Amino acid sequence: MLMPSTGPRTRAVRVRRQLPTSPWLFAAPGLLVIGAFILYPFVSTLVNAFTDRRTLIPGEFVGLANFRELLHDDMFWIGLRNSALYVLGVVPALVILPLLLALLVQKNIPGITFFRSAFYTPVVASIVVVGLIWVWLLDERGLVNSLLETIGVGRVGFLSDQWLLLMSAMAVTVWKGLGYYMIIYLAALANVPRELHEAAAVDGAGAVRRFVTVTVPAVRSTMALVGALSSVAAFKVFSEVYLMAGPSGGPAGEDTTLVMLVQRTGTGLTGRVGYASAISVVVFVVTVALMLLVLRADRRGES
Amino acid sequence: MPVSRRALVAAAVCLVLPLSACGSGGDDGGSTDASGKVEGDITFQTWNLRANFKPYFEGLIADFEKKYPGTKVKWVDQPAEGYADKISADAAGGTLPDVVNVSPDLVAPLAKAGLALDLDKAAGQYKKEYLEGAWASHQIPGMTGTYAFPWYLNTGPLFYNKSLFKKAGLDPDQPPKTYDELFADALQIAKNSDGEVSTLANVPTIEDFGRYGVELMNPAGTAFAFNDAKGVELLTKYKELYDAKALDPQALTATPESSGKKFLTEAVAMNPGSALDLGNFKKQAPNLYKNIGITDQITSTGHVNMYVMGVMVNAQTKKKPAAVAFAHYVTDAAHQMSFAKQVAIFPSTAGSLDDPYFTTEDGTDETRVRVAAAKSLKNAVNYTPVLFSEQMKTALRNEVAKALQGKESPKEALDNAVKACDTLLQRQG
Amino acid sequence: MTRVRRGELVLRYVLLIAVLALTVGPFLWQLSTSLKGPTEDIYSSPPTFLPQHPTLHNYERVSETIPVWDYAFNSLKVATANVVTNCVGAALAGYALARLRYRGRRVATLAFILAMLVPVEGIIIAQFTTMRELGLNNTLIGVVLPGCIGAMNVLLMRNAFLNLPYEIEEAAYVDGANVWQRFLRIAVPSVRGTLAVVAIFAFMGAWDDFLWPLIVLSDPSKFTLTIGLNYLHGTFANDERLVAAGTVIAVAPLIALFACLQRYFFRGVGEGAVKG
């Protein structure tokens, strides 16, 4: 859905005769809302990125000073590293695991609708609630550690080690996203002609081979879509890490992500709105680039 | 995607042009004259007090409205989290309430932006009603004036777990009194429990440096100075504790809540607290409550740390006389006293701490803690500099963590922290 | 292929139950914690999964501390409004993007895509300033407005409409139906499932939001549930049982709503609401 007009069907539509309408009336409410409350504030963020504006002090134009400062800001590089790691850690899991899950719940066996809905529950719960639940589960004396201790592994500092923290947050992101992307795959799998599978089965292909030779090619473009959606979301990650590692970003701030840095530098009474806006601009540019990258890779693979 | 560039440019221009330079400044912000008739509608904003003290504030407001017919006070209370975000949005948007519950670090940027009323000018006559130190806690280095009425104070003892002390071979009735004793005891507890029991659960914050006797800022208040020999000494000690697991290994990611929880679950042997916590221990950890030890805050300066809450008046309020009168009414001796009796906090008004309520013990732990705290408050200090912002706290915390992890020497870490805080001091204005 | 072999069936159920434990288990643990009495050790090892003395006491304390029902009612108002505006607005805009031809359609599509990529955390103060200029701060309308037609939802609807066979509308067009009639009588009924998806997203989004309502609202009588529940965290940070009860109160209505709508929801997805 992110791909503006690709695919044969859309093209067919475009060829068709134009229907005379009042199209702007249809689009106007939506455009007005996103214009006034998303794009307009964002444009002012773009402008702010070139000023030294602070929360309570209107800024002056400072040219590229904010961006130059970024280059020498260790925290910025830590943030960039963590946001990039987040993409690398989360995206493969969110492209593959939900597909496997979708295959698991695709077949109509008794009780399957219950399982499908149940798997979707983490998506429905709010991220704040999810954060509270997992912080409590992964607490040094929480359920997971109690279980680990019972089976003799001993307690693990999920929420105190820099890397374990980042990985725990990634696990929560994957946990919460599984159901969402599972649904997307279910929709795509519904369109895979059954004959393909049957033909492969007749040829003696095992389950793994059928998965690689039939399923994966058939849902390729969906995988690309999931890849694009999840990498954009992963790069902008805020809540999971903020809730689990705390506002200062884990030990020595080593778990800070870029959007956390935007929040930390730009908010509050002493916020450096200009500098935070410059970081926002970087986040925006990278997300756009990520999306184009994934979509281009998909297109190249297709041809 | 071939988007018409002209259309985009046009859209961008339309969007940018009406960008208003919102921020500080209104045209009626200049006057500090609060004389005149006390009347009109004002809004009073508190910070996380509704859940527990609704009847108290409703009564207070009703009394005020009765005393000054023609006034109407609207009370709004904000939750603990996001309070600074809420105030900054209101301040930037020009919707700050008339009377606002603040802490000194929130007052500083508001005063600099001309949003907090200078009470030396507008309400100087009330100054003598308050403890000198409390009144001074809302003064800002580099500015003249006082920008909030002092409200309640808080300080508290150090709680310790007697049974954990005993297990480590320490005398449970001889808690540490000095930093040296504290560090020695902590190391012994860690050693005798094979690193299972830590004594401290939090990394040192700016107030810890202050209490240790470190000079935090230069006298003019224009630059930070906590990277002196004394500061390095404290951090080096903490590093030693951290390596020995006498400082909790999870301290780097601890919050006051999480460390409180650790004390509650007897994973940590000591925790700073207030009289408020006693009830909590009794209810939630009866086992711990049986073994609770209470001792004084440790300080090298002779002054314990205190937290100060204030009530400021919006400099742009349309109802200046009523706002000032109400802010004073909330914080006057009688009302602070009755508030103190509702909850374990302490009044900042002169003489209130001499009330029998704060000087006589009846044998219970509650009164013992209260009396001791009230006594120590008379010369307590709010160590946290008013200019020390959230961002600076994070910078210090992160550098301290690097030193504890051994990624930087304590000296390097504090040098970096001071540098970062100085930069922020200049840039964030 | 239609008959599932027995061994495979067993394997499937084993896997399903394992995943079920992973996805739903954490919620049940939270529920169990919230039902445990003050005398029960919630930190025990090995853990006790079932409360030994189940009690609703924690829920009582939550509702004594904060006017949960008033806040829930405000949340309900906001969430309902958000569902209505999103369904209507996104359907209209999605239809315009998918079916109608006019100059500037690509720019309009691009605008929605860009809006989806904007990092919201960075623009919240600017949003508040806009809202204040409109005089809508401290109103529930102000809470609803910025998200009242989500870009994501518009793109979802656009996709749903794109996937409808064109011929049906063509026929209606030939019969002389105007664009509103075609939209209302033919297009919208065919994408009901996607509308259910949008409705759920909209409800969830509004019900969950914390920072924005906090910034916009000053008046406690207008607070939504998430802000209200935040009092719990500030006031009873040390009591996991109360925090757990609060989270259960926050999440239960969403799960209930989803359980009711899930049939439409999964059908909507089947319609290709989110296909590439």
Image: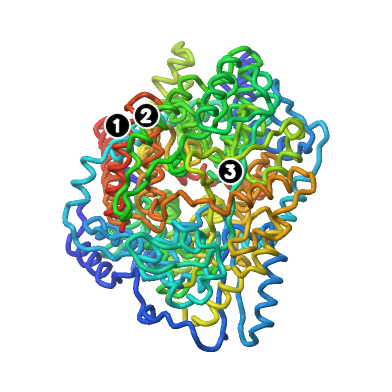
Work out whether residue C144 can be spotted: no
Q: How far apart are the two marked residues, 3 and 2, measured between alpha carbons?
A: 34 Å
Residue A297 drawn at (x, y percent): 26, 33
Residue corresponding to mark 3: A129
Same chain for mark 3 and mark 1? The answer is no
Residue marked by disc 1: B412
x, y percentage for residue A162?
A: 42, 28
Residue for point 65% across, 44% down: C243
Is residue B389 at least partly visible in the picture?
yes
Q: Residue at x 27, y 54 (%)?
A: B427
| Residue type highlighted by circle 1 | Glu
Q: Secondary structure at mark 1?
A: helix
The answer as to whether the residues below labels 3 and 2 share one chain is no
Is residue B380 shown above or below B352? Answer: above
Q: Is residue A183 above or below residue B171?
A: below
Q: Which residue is mark 2?
A: B403
Between tags 3 and 1, which lies in front? 1
> Which of the two discs, 2 and 1, labels the residue nearer the N terminus?
2
- Mark 3, mark 2: which one is toward the viewer? 2
Image quarter hosting the C terminus of chain C: top left
Nearer-the-camera pick, C263 or C171: C263
Mark 1: give few (<14), some (14-19) or many (20+) Cα within 10 Å.
some
As drawn, is A294 to the left or to the right of C141? left
Q: Dot 2, crowdedness within 10 Å: few (<14), some or many (≥20)?
A: many
> Could you tell me which secondary element the residue under label 2 belongs to?
helix
Name the amino acid type tagged 3.
Val
Tell me what residue is drawn at x 40 percent, y 70 percent: B115
Position of residue A102 measured from the top left corner of the image (x, y, whole percent): 52, 30
Instruction: Work out how far the residue at label 2 is from the one at label 1, CA to CA, in angstroms.
Output: 8 Å
